[in-house]
Image (cartoon, rainbow, N blue to C red):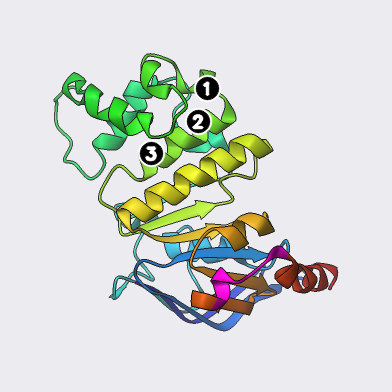
């Protein structure tokens, strides 16, 4: 489903701050896998997601999505096939638009532009049914501005928006990091339900080791542009936080 082949990436090339992050790095993610990615700061976690989404391009190597070479494809074109939820709840929704308006905009993703109304009232019942699954009462607040929602509510709305259209890949870039513990738990439960029901291929970067252990079908630990741990299948199901904490502390100190 997703393949990064022989990736090289250097930041600030030719300067005193030159940093070679990836050197001949390869990673494959199969269709339907839910991969939790952990690692110390600067290990390459978010850069990995940016290479897949097209926010950044490698100096060398190939990025494949669904078998197609997308290495030079612009980010906006890849976005037709990728849903992404970022760390900041403000990034996935429009604060000055209502919940209804936000969902209507998302509903028009990949649709041709014309002079029809942006808000389709006929879809409101569908939107309410979608929001009911979040168990946050958002279905009763369709006229509320997204900017008036709590961080957890807004991230749940962002997740619904990211997964409304027919996507091939779901990218979660520390999407619980800015939330309080209770909201984080709730959002992870919603995430698990959405991923399971729609069978999305999913990559989730997180600093929460418990989430990385409890959720997903595979765990990858990054350090200095390398995958220093890659556990899937039965071994992943048996993992406990203590099993990876020692390695995580070790790479965090280096």
Q: Are marks 3 and 1 in contact (CB under 8 Å)?
A: no
Labels 1 and 2: the sequence-earlier one: 1
Q: Is residue 95 above or below residue 239?
A: above
- Pick whichever of labels 2 and 3 is earlier in the sequence: 2
Residue 27 in sight: yes
Q: CA distance from mark 3 to mark 1?
A: 15 Å
Q: Compared to 102, does 9 lie above or below? A: below
Q: Is residue 160 magenta?
A: no
Element type where label 1 sits in the image: loop
Farthest residue toward the right?
253
- Confirm or deny contact between disc 2 and disc 3 (CB under 8 A): no
Mark 3 highlights which residue? 160
Q: Is residue 56 something one can see in this rendering?
A: no
The CA span between labels 2 and 3 is 10 Å
Crowding at label 3, few (<14), some or many (≥20) Cα neighbours within 10 Å?
Answer: many
- Determine the residue located farthest toward the top in the rendered image: 143
Q: Nearer the viewer, residue 236 or 86?
A: 236
Q: Is residue 54 left or right of residue 204?
A: left
For numbered disc 2, what is the local secondary structure? helix
Residue that badge 1 annotates: 149
Q: Is residue 249 above or below residue 168?
A: below
Q: Which residues are magenta?
A: 235-241
Q: In the image, residue 62 lies at what x, y percent?
A: 41, 78
Instruction: Please name the residue shown 31% across and 36% down the image.
Output: 106
**Residue at 63 percent of width and 67 percent of height:** 44
Residue holding disc 2: 154
Lower sequence index among marks 3 and 1 = 1
Query: Do residues under tags 1 and 2 come within 8 Å of each other at their CB atoms?
Result: yes
Q: Position of residue 148 (x, y in %)?
A: 53, 18
Q: Quadrant of residue 212?
A: bottom right
Marks 1 and 2, how far apart in space? 6 Å
């Amino acid at each position: 489903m997703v393949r990064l082949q022989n990736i090289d990436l250097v930041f600030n090339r030719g300067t005193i701050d030159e940093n070679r992050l990836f050197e001949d790095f390869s990673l494959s993610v199969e269709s339907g896998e839910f991969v939790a990615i952990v690692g110390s700061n600067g290990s390459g976690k978010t850069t990995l997601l940016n290479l897949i989404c097209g926010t950044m391009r490698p100096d060398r190597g190939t990025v494949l999505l669904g078998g197609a070479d997308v290495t030079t494809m612009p980010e906006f074109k890849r976005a037709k096939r990728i849903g992404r939820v970022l760390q900041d709840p403000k990034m996935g929704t429009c604060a000055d638009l209502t919940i209804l308006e936000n969902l209507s905009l998302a509903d028009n993703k990949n649709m041709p532009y014309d002079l029809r109304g942006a808000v389709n009232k006929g879809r409101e019942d569908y939107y309410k049914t979608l929001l009911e699954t979040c168990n946050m009462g958002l279905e009763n607040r369709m006229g509320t501005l997204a900017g008036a929602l709590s961080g957890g509510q807004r991230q749940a709305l962002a997740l619904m928006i990211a997964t409304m259209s027919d996507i091939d890949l779901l990218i979660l870039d520390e999407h619980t990091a800015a939330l309080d513990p209770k909201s984080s738990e709730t959002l992870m439960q919603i995430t698990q339900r959405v991923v399971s029901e729609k069978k999305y291929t999913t990559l989730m970067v997180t600093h929460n080791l418990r989430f990385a252990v409890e959720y997903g079908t595979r765990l990858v630990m990054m350090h200095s542009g390398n995958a220093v741990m890659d556990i899937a299948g039965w071994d992943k199901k048996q993992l406990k936080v203590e099993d990876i904490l020692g390695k995580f502390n070790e790479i965090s100190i280096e």
